[in-house]
Amino acid sequence: MAKTVSALGIKAPNASILADNVVKHLDDPAETVVFLLSPGAEEGMEAVAGKHGYTLEITSAENHTEARMTPAGNIMEEIDVSGDFCPGPVITVGTILATLPVGERLKVTSASADSIADIAAAVESSGSKVVKQGADGEKHYLIAEKAEKQEGTQAVVSRDRVLIAQSNGIGNAERAYATFLFAKAAQSMGKEVTIFLLMDGVSMARQGNAAVVKHPAFDRLDHLMDEVIRGGATVYACEMSAKFRGIGEADLVDGVRLAGAATYIQLLSDPANAVVNF
Amino acid sequence: METIYQVLALAVLASSMVTGFIIFRMLGMKLALHFGALMLALVATLAALATGIPALALAAAALQVLATVTAFTQVWATFKYSFQTSPGFAPHLAMVTMLPVLAAASVLL
């Protein structure tokens, strides 16, 4: 469990004097302490951390700075989900995060950048934070910090994004066309478009498949798809549905990337997205 | 040559036009080659029955086999990745699969 102390509004060096006193009188010396500071007030924190044998990590947020003091010897839990595919990594990380106390961190590594992006979506959806994300050689990683899920406040959201969920593929020409015709219409209306191809829908994402779908009244499906992608649409293919059909990342059309269940759920949960299902 | 097998093949070809039309609505022009083979087989079978010429019966049998082969090669490309629409293709594939058997019977028996 990490203790959070708000010292917003207190300037340096008073903030570090306060931090020194807090750390000195902690009930549990193995506890991590997070100080919320006004920008610039982190001056002198390093000396406090050094004096008490803590590791200091400073992160800047929008209107405050966070100084995280972790007792040296506290080792962050780590997990490697390489080789596991959707939704396995998301479930594994979710289960571990559920058991961690608030404020604790978990490092997740994977050989797949798509898996890490999916896990990041799941972590944020669950109310926790992704404090760091990047690549380390061949591996991709993220550091998640457990947080309490905040209850959402009622707010007016402008639905300026369109999510098209497509579960029909080249086996149903009309529905396949509908995906990209609606996407083009939405783009022409200034909407941001995301397309999620799942189940039979992923058949369109395989190179060459869309080229065989042609309606006399419309342009070839692969041309439409290319236009929509070049127009700025984000196109995801469901990792699990692709695996079901023997479609790998290398088989996908340029501009389409694999995504997991967490990405889909997060897109569906985003109130700014108007969802269209085919 | 038994004309009864040619009559049966003609019945299958006529029925295939119905199931084929449903697939055509789903897949579009992708099935043009198969549609052509099916039509030629229908015309050749009708002609063989009407005239009784052995060479026409052989040509009809060959076209019936070709209709089946083209059905599988063209529908398979879709069926490989689209599972949910497969029940729509099944009646047509089952129907045209009878054709090679009847074609062989009409030539050999």
Image (spheres, grey):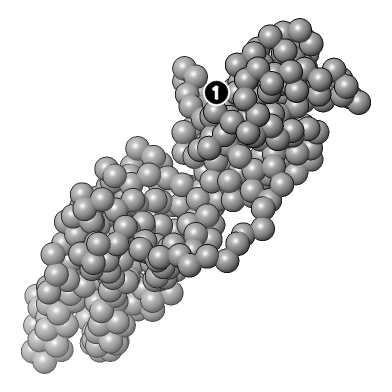
Q: Nearer the viewer, residue A8 or A47?
A: A8
Q: Amino acid at mark 1?
A: Gly
Q: Residues within 10 Å of mark 1 (few under 14, many from 20)?
A: few
Q: Nearer the viewer, residue B96 or B33?
A: B33
Callout 1: residue from which chain? A
Q: Position of residue B58 (x, y in %)?
A: 15, 73
Residue A119, visible in the rendered structure: yes
Residue labelled with disc 1? A40
**Number of marks present in the image shown:** 1
Q: Residue at x 75, y 39 (%)?
A: A102
> Would you say A36 lies left or right of A223 here?
right
Please state which of residues A39 and B39 is positioned toward the viewer in this rendering.
A39
Left-right relation of B87 to A224: right
Q: Indicate the quadrant where residue B89 lies.
A: bottom left
Tell whether A64 sits left or right of A246: right
The residue at the point 43 percent across, 63 percent down is A273
Question: Which quarter of the figure is the C terminus of chain A placed in?
Answer: bottom left
